[in-house]
Image (cartoon, rainbow, N blue to C red):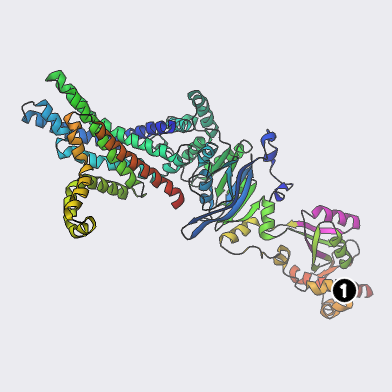
Amino acid sequence: MKGTLVIFRRELAGLFAAPLAWILLFVALLLNGYLFSLVLSQTQGDVTASLEFVFGGNFIFWALMLVLSPLLAMRLLTEEAASGTLEYLRTAPVSDAAVVLGKFLAGTGFMATLWSSLFIYAGALSIWGVSPDWGQVSAIFIGAVLSSALFVSIGLVACSLTNIPLLAAFLAFMACVWWVLLPSLGGLLLIQMRVLLADIFGSFETAEAWIGGALERMDVRRHFGNSYYQGVLDSAEIIFFLSWIGLFLFFTTRSLEARRWRG
Amino acid sequence: MQASRAFPLASPLRLAPGAGTLLRPMIEVSHLTRRFGSLVAVDDVSFTLDAGEVVGFLGPNGAGKTTTMRMLAGYLAATSAETLKVAGLDVLRDSLNVRRHIGYLPESVPLYREMRVREMMSFQGRLHGMTRADRARRIPEVLERVGVLDRKQQLVGHLSRGLRQRVGLAVALLPNPEVLILDEPTSGLDPLQRAEVRALIRELAGEHTVLLSSHILAEVESMSERVIILRQGAVVADGSREELITTLGGRGHVRIEAVLGDADEAQQLLEALPGVEQVESTGRLGIHDGFTLSGEGDLREDVGALAAQRGWALRELTEQRPNLEALFARLVMGEPVVDEPRPGTSESGSPPPSVPLTSAPSGSGLDLMPAAAPLGTPGEKKDFYSLNPFDGGGSRDLSKPVSSAASDDSKSKDDRCDEEDDS
């Protein structure tokens, strides 16, 4: 695990040593900050509403997450594979799991840096205006970081499958988008396969209850909205994110290990 | 293979200081195979490297050099292997420990371009679990050694190819690994940088066990005593330059040309020398008889001693080795090399009827009379020139070029002598 820490530090330093990270941060924060001040002035200074709108209440929040996470995963894994430094890392005395975990933590760390702007907004508000609900602000931050972590881990799985950076980023992006849209698209899919499902499950209603229920439970936005967004830290919600993240990191490690055999 | 490496010309590296720890096998590979789908990249390769040895992998592109090195470094898994050990540890089962003993530098010299040289070194040190004090001591030391200490604050991405190669070497050397695996360490460098890297690698001999690769023979030879030639995934030859020549092109030959009186008796004497396996007459050239000897080791001394003892007047005593460069070039082209023609016959080529000459009984000059007689008639020749300071027997027609006159004369010398004496 010492290796994980060493790799985490290097990856994070590597991200911030290149202009890419700064440009991403600059553009994202500019957009978010403008949105925040816009909402703040439109709502006549409703602090809670403004914070909620910018962090989770609108699609821009999710769009940032869905675009940035795959890009980070691509940069962390596929670009390294293409430039050969992954060969260096994987012949160093650290396990593949440590490499994956270190890279994942670095990507999550970058997203956490982005979302830490929440505290700047909240801090600014509390100095010059009304103090926000700090409990809710912290919960939203934790939720945002966990959601980003989930998308980074999905991105890592997709990026471990190919050595072509553009393709990797695209695959990772599509995987993340599908993960978010699946619950809403699930209904359409179910109706499409109604005959087949009715055959398997006996009746379409049971199938809808089963599969629809399962898909609903995978809905990241619902999980985020039901707890963190409300300022609630629910252990079940934390476990939901951590277990999916763990599964995807496991897949990434396995996929990297398979490269030793595939070549 | 072990026995063949006890060759007298074996590297002085194994006599390096600290010889007590040496001669322990550091890399053991036997029956190593790697397939990529239907392609067999490495095919049943076996070799052993002793501690402190510097060995070069040589072979054309796609011969399996990089694949073998990657398997040793733990980057690729072997499809099958009986033994795959580095520093006594199994590469497949104990991969992490093995990697602690290896400094591996891939051909692409993968370094983080956005980091400074010092940071890159520091990262490598941390990956290998070196303490802060260790790093502070060792990093300047290693950078100094490869000659980039003054560049430690520069970004790796801003370095030239040659400097990056050196930084790559420094990174590999930092944890002081017992085994260094360097894939094409001199590729992409200009001649000066090449020479510097070569000198550096030669310096490392004895301290580290080094396995390096190149597709250029001269490169490998300048860095390592022992060369393993790979072709299409298989080991074709393994050993020093001498041993490679023997494996690839057969033995060396000693060519002797002397005035030695009775050619048949001389041939028997030569055949009786220790180590001589075959003596072939190349016929008579003027008054000189020529022979090509093949056998174990360098036969020149023995032949020279024999000549001195018998009072032969030597004109030529040379060792003719098959040319390793040519052998390797043919190997790369995919041609078989074992049927390399004998240098003696391929080079001179002019006296084809050597067999009837040597098989002719001694003193039976009459056998050669039909061919020699027309040339030997005094009326046809204007100038004769004695070639033999001892018995005044030989002469050559000066009106003809040496090559044609020589081959003619070699057959007619005895007869002409007689004729001139008579007249």
With A133 as the anchor, is A239 left or right in this view?
A: right
Residue at screen point 13% across, 33% down: A53
Q: SS at mark 1?
A: helix
The residue lying toward the viewer, choosing from B150 and A212, is: A212
Chain at tag 1: B
Q: How many marks?
A: 1
The residue lying toward the viewer, choosing from B196 and A18, is: A18
The residue lying toward the viewer, choosing from B413 and A130, is: A130
Q: Is residue B393 above or below residue A174?
A: below
Q: Position of residue A30 (x, y in %)?
A: 18, 33
With B305 as the anchor, is B29 left or right in this view?
A: left
Task: Please tell me in which quadrant of the rendered image residue A244 appears.
Answer: top left
Residue at screen point 82% across, 52% down: B301
**Magenta-tinted stretch:** B289-318
Q: Which residue is mark 1?
A: B416
Badge 1 local density, few (<14 within 10 Å), some, or many (20+)?
Answer: many
The residue lying toward the viewer, choosing from B91 and B417, is: B91
